[in-house]
Image (spheres, rainbow, N blue to C red):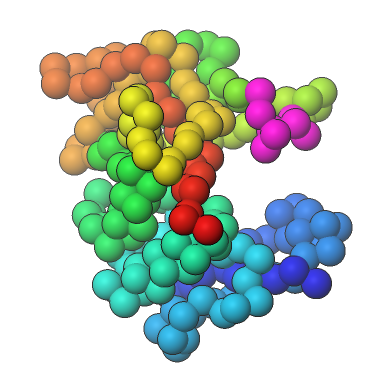
């Protein structure tokens, strides 16, 4: 059975419920991976899952993930809204030309949030990864989401597919203070943000 390794040790949110059931239905096995205790990502990994770390990776932990990805590995990575810098974790994303914008995205379009503007219901782009979304499962809930900076111009050996986007009425609120208003204040970026993306790197092989 293919093995999905769930990275632990950085305050990641533990998988549970329907996500684990979905893995089992797909005949995939889930195992925990504590990078501190391993020399590298195990060779039998079909993918690694990094689910919202709240503390930064060590340099060695980040290097192990980067080495795995640069050897043809796959990863599902989510972020957790935190105010502290995470330079080593973000270095993993930078291998694919992406950065996380500091702050929390809110959306003022009534069709793009549930009850509160930071409980996002993003626009879902039609792609292979989103084919299962429809009918009663047509929404994706993305609370306290962060924006992903994706290069607008083509980058050699890299290809991007934006999967989840906000409306044009979204605002990136500062992470340094409590949100007093959902409207854009001075210095706060506004417009359409990407909060979910697929990035693919073409290796020499």
User: In the image, is residue 35 above or below residue 159?
Assistant: below
User: Which residue sits at x=80%, y=72%?
Assistant: 1
Q: Is residue 176 left or right of residue 155?
A: left
Q: Residue placed at 27% from the left, 28% from the top? A: 173
Residue at (65% x, 76% y) in the render: 44
Answer with the quarter of the image where residue 89 lies.
Answer: bottom left
Residue 29 in magenta stretch? no
For the question of whether residue 136 can be seen, the reply is yes
Q: Nearer the viewer, residue 46 or 181?
A: 46
Q: Is residue 116 left or right of residue 85?
A: right
User: Within the image, what quadrant is residue 146 found in?
Assistant: top left
Whether residue 143 is visible here, answered yes or no, is no
Depth check, front residue: 67 or 47: 67
Q: Is residue 121 above or below residue 77?
A: above
At a point 23% along the width and 58% down the height, the residue shown is: 87
- Percent across and percent down for residue 61 are 36, 74
The one nearer the camera, 90 or 66, is 66
- State left or right for residue 166 relative to residue 102: right
Q: Which residues are magenta?
A: 126-133
């Amino acid at each position: 059975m293919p093995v999905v390794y769930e990275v632990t040790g950085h305050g990641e949110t533990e998988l549970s419920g329907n996500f684990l059931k979905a893995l089992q239905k797909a005949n995939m096995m889930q195992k925990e991976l504590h990078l501190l205790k391993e020399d590298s990502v195990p060779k039998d990994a079909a993918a690694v899952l990094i689910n919202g770390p709240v503390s930064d990776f060590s340099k060695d932990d980040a290097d192990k993930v980067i080495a795995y990805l640069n050897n043809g590995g796959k990863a599902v990575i989510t972020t957790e809204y935190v105010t502290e810098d995470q330079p080593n974790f973000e270095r993993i994303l930078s291998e694919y030309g992406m950065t996380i914008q500091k702050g929390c995205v809110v959306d003022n379009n009534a069709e793009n949030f549930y009850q509160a503007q930071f409980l996002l219901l993003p626009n879902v782009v039609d792609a292979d990864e989103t084919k299962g979304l429809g009918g009663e499962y047509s929404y994706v809930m993305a609370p306290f989401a962060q924006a992903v900076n994706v290069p607008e111009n083509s980058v050699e050996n890299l290809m991007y597919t934006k999967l989840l986007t906000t409306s044009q009425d979204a605002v990136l609120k500062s992470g340094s203070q409590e949100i007093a208003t959902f409207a854009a204040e001075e210095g706060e970026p506004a417009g359409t943000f990407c909060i979910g993306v697929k990035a693919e790197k073409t290796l020499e092989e």
